Image: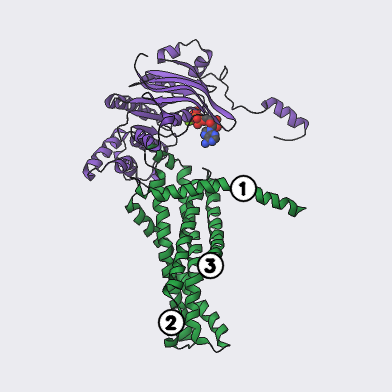
Amino acid sequence: MAMLEFIPQLGRRTLQSIPGLGAASRFLLTSLLSVFNRHFSFQQLFRQIYGFGVRSLILMVVAAFFTGMVLGFQGYYALVRFGATSALGTLVALSLLRELGPVLTALLFAGRAGSALTAEISSMKATEQLSAMEMMAVNPLAWVVAPRLWAGIISVPILCAIFDLVGIFGGYLISVPVLGVDGGTFWAQMQSNVTFSGDILTGLFKALCFGVVVTWIAAWKGYTARPTAEGVGNATTLSVVTASLTVLGLDFILTALLFS
Amino acid sequence: MAAEALVELENVCFARGSHPVLAGVDMRIPRGAIVALMGASGGGKTTMLNLMAGTLRPQSGQIRIAGQNLQKFSGDAMYALRRQMGMLFQHSALFTDLTAFENVAFPLRRHFRLPENVLRKLVMMKLEAVGLRGAAGLFPAELSGGMGRRIALARAVIMDPMLIFYDEPFTGLDPISVGIIASLIKRLNTALGATSVLVSHDVEETFSIADYGFILAGGKIIAEGTPAELRNSDSALARQFLGGQPDGPVPFHYPARQDYAAALRDSHAAGEVI
Ligand SMILES: Nc1ncnc2c1ncn2[C@@H]1O[C@H](COP(=O)(O)OP(=O)(O)OP(=O)(O)O)[C@@H](O)[C@H]1O
Ligand SMILES: [Mg+2]
């Protein structure tokens, strides 16, 4: 009985969300295209990229370092049973480049920079700052939203590349000096088994897609938040939850498409 | 009222959900005048300013600015028109991450490329006019409510607009500042050759500078005229409003589903405590 009610309700929910998705897509496109608007400022864009970098860089480096070290340990115990520890470098690098780098970067970015972005935009809305801007003939999509969206889209792949590098370094530190895998083999195996377009570029492409999705959700949730203190709080939580789930779901789809 | 009208409202209706805010407003704002808009709290005065500025659209009726229908304006034309409008928001709406100086400079920076020293002079002139040159470096969180209003006022007029909306410019100001701000509004209107719409509950101060006034009640304009005409109006509504009497045709209460006495009786019968 509960199941029978659940199915039409799911259908209704999905149908209800379609117009919202349309509005959100229009919001994304208009904002991205407003690079051509006279109120778009590259100075604002660089400030935002710098802001995202400062906010997330240390977090990314620490997270990547530990992720790489854990990969080194776990990979070693899996491979040593087959006497295949020479493949450890490849294992660490491929796991990071193809999967963990983009996904963890996006999740951390959603939690750190995405939430801040939602809170910023929604509280600007709640205190009528966006209306004031509109009244001063400055398009808030061009002045506020567009630089933040573009900054997110540009930052996430860069942060992902840093994540990958630091992670591989962490994996190396555990594998070679600690677990005694031969250093030459570690790097040589990695070099011959990791391809530039197949692994590195597709991983960064994933990160780019996640960057679009995370900043889009963060900006949209902020822009459509109810203009109250509670609305700001709800929007911020919802932004992180929605963005994280969407990244994981999208990761499955992208992996199936890109690596099959 | 022979002067040419700058803003005209014709049978404008606007509702928030099922709650009608404006129910057929007709209004003519002559060019160059200071026009007062008064009415009960929650009566739709802020809504009317937003309609005239094009940030809200009426559900029916027409709003014309300089003879042109506002609904026909494209996005770009609307922005071009707004560069000639200024609005003092009821809750100031200052940018919290910018200093007082940068708040006032914001419209100038966005629309013109001025050398820094020229910009500085223009902004400082306006800050001096509202008496806050010394507060230029403070952030909105460091300003008192009344100081915030005055910074917002300076920002509203920094572009020398031809149409200025003041949403309750006197709230939060001490009696001395009220007088100074009132005469500033008057002087700006003369100096810029602008037209001003002033929403205020301060009847005395408003009538001392306004050329014409409208009283809004029940979603309609119930009285209009020069301050002298309004004071001598034979409309019971207008007299009640200007005299500040609690009893009369203008209800103090926002419409509730049930009369309070009846609600009390019912809940008492049901054994509830409210
Ligand atoms: N964003 C909104 N959403 C829903 N209803 C609103 C909104 N803004 C205003 N209202 C409603 O519209 C009506 C008119 O509000 P408005 O702000 O125009 O009143 P006002 O005349 O400016 O009052 P005050 O003198 O207190 O500022 C009120 O009944 C209010 O409840
Ligand atoms: Mg109001």
**Image mark 2: chain:** A
The residue located at (50%, 19%) in the rendering is B241
- Give the mark nearer the N terminus: 3 vs 1: 1
Q: Position of residue B125 (x, y in %)?
A: 26, 36
Q: In whole angstroms, how far apart are the C-alphas of marks 3 and 1?
A: 27 Å
What type is the residue that disc 3 sits on?
Thr
Q: Element at badge 1?
A: helix
Q: In whole angstroms, how far apart are the C-alphas of marks 2 and 3?
A: 22 Å
Could you tell me if residue B144 is visible in this image? no
Asked whether the residues under the numbered discs 3 and 1 touch, taking CB atoms below 8 Å apart as contact, a structural biologist would say no
Q: Position of residue B138 (x, y in %)?
A: 35, 45
Q: Are marks 2 and 3 on the same chain?
A: yes
Q: Is residue B179 left or right of residue A89?
A: left
B166 vs B50, nearest the viewer:
B50
What type is the residue that disc 1 sits on?
Leu
Could you tell me if residue B196 is visible in this image? yes
Which tint is chain A? green
Asked whether the residues under the numbered discs 2 and 1 touch, taking CB atoms below 8 Å apart as contact, a structural biologist would say no
The residue located at (22%, 44%) in the rendering is B115
What residue is disc 1 on? A15
* Residue B106 position (above or below residue B204): below
Res. A192 image quadrant: bottom left
What residue is disc 2 on? A192
* Residue A85 position (above or below residue A130): below
Report the number of numbered marks. Answer: 3
What residue is disc 3 on? A255
- Give the mark nearer the N terminus: 2 vs 1: 1
Q: Position of residue B216 (x, y in %)?
A: 49, 21
Which tint is chain B? purple
